[in-house]
Amino acid sequence: MAVRVAITGFGGRMGRALAEALLLSDEAELSAAVVRPGSSLVGADAGEVAGLGRNGIAIVDSLDKADFDVLIDFTAPQATVDNSAYCAAHGHPIVIGTTGFDSEQKNQVLTNAGKVALCLASNFSTGVNLCFKLLEIAARVMGEDADIEIVEAHHRHKVDAPSGTALSMGEVVAETLGRDLEKVAIYGREGQTGARERDTIGFATVRGGDVVGEHSVMFLAEGERVEISHRASSRLSFARGAVRAAIWLMGNKQSVRAPGHYDMRDVLGLN
C-alpha cells in the first residue's frame, strides 16, 4: 500500500514539482494538497493545478481537512513552525525543506522532533548531500592550508541569502575544522577589507533569472585549487529526494520511524 503524502504550499513551484515526483513514485502517492486560507486555488483539482491532469483531489486550506500519513512542507518559516506542531500533535511524520528560519523558529521546529519523526534538510538533492560528504573529506585534507570560499546562485524570487544549502556547506566545513561558523563567516566584502584571514569562510550570493540552484565550495591553496560544485537544472531533483525521505520516515508503514530529528544524509545512509 502506497504511503499517503500531503503537500503544503501546493500552489508554489516546489508544490507542483512534488506532485510530479509523487506521480513518478511506485511507493508513495498524493493524498492531500494544502494552500493558505483565502487562496483562489481552494477547491480546484490538484492534478490540474500541477499540470498533470485531473486526479480528483480537491485543494484544501487546512491540514484539518487533509487525510495523509506524512507531510512534506516547503513553505515559509512560521507556516512550517505551525505545520510541524500540528504533525507532532497528531502523530504525522514530516519532511521539511523550508529555509530561512531564525534561531527561535528552528528551535520550535526541532522541539517537535521529540514527538514525531522529522526530516529537516536544507537540500533534498542526492547530489548535494553527496557533496556534503565530499566537503568533510576535503576539509580534513586541505582545510588548514587553504582559503575557503562558498558561492551560490538562485533565481530572482528567492527571499533568503545565503541559501540554506550554502550555510549547510559552511557548517559542514566549519565543524570538520573545529571552527564556529557564526564567528568565522564573512558575508560579502566591500571597500578596504585588508588581507584575508585564513580561518574565515567567505560567502558570495548571486540572484537572478530562473537559476534553480548552483553551489560551489573552493579550497584555494598555494599553487592549486579544489572546487566541489553542484548545479541543479530542475526542482524535480529536490522533489524526488523529499519523496524518498517521506517514504523512509514511514518505514514499512506498520512501523513508522522513531521520533527524532533526521536529515537527508540519514535517508541516504551517509551519516
Image: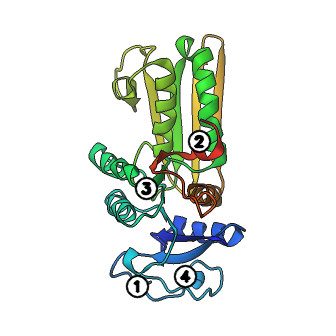
Report the mark closest to the observer, 1 or 4.
4
Callout 1 crowding tier (Cα within 10 Å): few <14, some 14–19, many ≥20:
few
Q: Nearer the viewer, mark 3 or mark 2?
A: 3
| Position of the C terminus by quadrant | top right
Circle nearer the viewer, 2 or 1: 2
The image's mark for residue 150 is none
Q: Secondary structure at mark 4?
A: helix
Which callout, 2 or 4, points to the residue nearer the camera? 2
Which element carries disc 2, helix, strand or loop?
A: helix
Who's the residue at 45% across and 28% down the image?
Answer: 202
Q: Residue at x 53, y 12 (%)?
A: 144
User: Disc 1 marks which amino acid?
Assistant: Ser
Amino acid identity at mark 2: Arg
Left or right placement of residue 185 versus residue 23 in this view: left
- Counting residues from the start of the chain, the first of labels 3 and 1 encountered is 1
- Residue under circle 1? 40
The residue where tag 3 is placed is 116
Which label is found at residue 265? Answer: 2
Q: Position of residue 229 (x, y in %)?
A: 64, 37
